[in-house]
């Protein structure tokens, strides 16, 4: 058994896949889920069946699975949070009393502003433990849950940016997790990982623009291959330009979606449509079965709304992003502007760009409460 002990928080498709993958690599792995019933079979079996990209099946044996957060965190070196971004705040509140000096918390991914909000909550709750909070720009796998104790990995991403808050601790986090995931690469800071958020560009728009097809077929089509036409891809390109403009206003030089597809999956093309269609990692991934899906209820309030909030603070127009939020509002009857993550939640309200950069780089000029 390798020395680093991992706790995975969340037993959805990503959490189960990561827990099994780490266990198969020889690490001690605990799996936490807030609802015990959801992990009953994993508790009974003590393992998760993982189907890899080559269609082989492997059994990843866990140290234990539990719904007791204190037990899950006790003695863990690295805490991998693999839950929808809508749960980040609740997980921060659950963890705060039980975190200990030296632990590393990584949000996989942070969506937009996840690490900033997580740290803000720990501060407000008076968590005095010397822990590092970090986030990735995207989840390291394309994966799906295939049963109560089963998961499938369709593809590993080649490179996934990771940043700690503040960025002076990024090297330590990468060194700690390198044996498990050498695909993690250093990002300049959490502004980069937040604004390199490709789920914000792909997930909500493709779900909303394919709403009738999803409802008619219950998701029986390939989400990225069949669901992306030249017209929908052009809309994605406009969304992507707005994201890049927000990043530029904050001094962040992030990648276009086209470049990201090449870096993450080695998928190339002259246009976004061509690159998506050329991506083997998207083959076989079905669309959501219905519109009550995390691609809307997670990605709209916790990926798109914080981008709009940042854009508003720094004078960037977000007309296409706003259009996606409004469509989600109509379909779900939910005001995601009110529910979503804002600059205030991230501790950035009223800060100038140079103050924000000092905070995310070095921890100086701590966020205003």
Image (cartoon, rainbow, N blue to C red):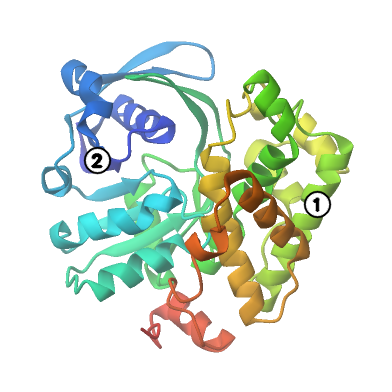
Tell me if residue 114 comes above or below residue 46 in the rendering. Answer: below
Q: What residue sits 14% from the left and 41% below the top?
A: 68
Residue 351 in the image: above or below residue 284? below
The reply, left or right, for residue 26 in relation to residue 158 is left
Residue 203 vs residue 64, the one in the foreground: 203
Tag 1 secondary structure: helix
Please report contact status of discs 1 and 2: CB closer than 8 Å, yes or no: no
Residue beneath the point at 50% across and 29% down: 143
Q: Which mark is residue 34?
A: 2
Query: Which label sits on residue 177?
Result: none
- The reply to whether residue 334 is visible in this rendering is yes
**Which one is in front, 91 or 152?**
91
- Kindly indicate the quadrant of the structure image that contains residue 154: top right
Residue 365 image-quadrant placement: bottom left
Q: Which is more N-terminal, label 2 or label 1?
A: 2
Q: Is residue 55 left or right of residue 95?
A: right
Q: Position of residue 355 (x, y in %)?
A: 50, 87
- Say which residue appears at 77% left-offset and 48% top-offset: 236
Q: Position of residue 141 (x, y in %)?
A: 51, 35
Disc 2 packing (10 Å; few <14; some 14–19; many ≥20): some
Residue 2 or residue 111, whichever sits in front: 111
**Residue tagged by mark 1?**
237
């Amino acid at each position: 058994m390798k020395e680093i002990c991992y706790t995975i928080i969340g037993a959805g498709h990503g959490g189960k896949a990561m827990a099994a993958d780490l266990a198969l690599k020889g690490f001690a792995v605990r799996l936490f889920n807030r609802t015990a019933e959801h992990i009953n079979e994993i508790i009974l079996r003590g393992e998760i069946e993982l189907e890899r990209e080559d269609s082989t099946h492997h059994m990843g044996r866990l140290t234990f699975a539990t719904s007791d957060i204190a037990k899950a965190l006790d003695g863990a070196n690295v805490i991998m949070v693999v839950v929808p971004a809508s749960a980040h705040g609740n997980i921060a509140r659950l963890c705060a009393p039980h975190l200990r000096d030296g632990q590393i918390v990584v949000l996989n991914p942070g969506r937009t502003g996840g690490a900033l909000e997580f740290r803000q909550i720990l501060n407000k709750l008076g968590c005095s433990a010397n822990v590092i909070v970090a986030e990735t720009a995207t989840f390291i796998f394309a994966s799906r849950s295939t049963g109560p104790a089963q998961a499938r990995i369709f593809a590993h991403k080649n490179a996934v940016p990771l940043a700690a808050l503040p960025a002076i601790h990024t090297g330590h986090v990468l060194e700690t997790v390198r044996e498990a995931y050498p695909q993690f690469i250093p990002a300049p800071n959490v502004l980069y990982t937040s604004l390199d958020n490709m789920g914000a560009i792909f997930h909500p728009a493709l779900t909303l623009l394919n709403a009738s097809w999803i409802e008619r077929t219950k998701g029986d089509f390939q989400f990225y291959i069949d669901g992306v036409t030249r017209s929908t891809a052009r809309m994605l390109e406009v969304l992507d330009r707005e994201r890049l403009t927000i990043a530029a206003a904050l001094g962040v030089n992030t990648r276009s979606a086209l470049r990201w597809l090449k870096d993450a999956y080695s998928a190339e093309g002259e246009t976004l449509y061509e690159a998506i269609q050329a991506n083997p990692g998207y083959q076989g991934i079905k669309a959501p079965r219905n519109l009550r899906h995390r691609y809307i209820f997670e990605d709209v309030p916790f990926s798109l709304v914080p981008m709009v909030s940042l854009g508003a603070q720094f004078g960037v127009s977000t007309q296409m992003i706003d259009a996606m939020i409004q469509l989600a509002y109509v379909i779900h009857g939910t005001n995601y502007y009110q529910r979503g993550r804002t600059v205030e939640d991230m501790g950035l309200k009223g800060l100038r760009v140079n103050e924000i950069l000092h905070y995310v780089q070095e921890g100086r000029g701590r966020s205003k409460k």
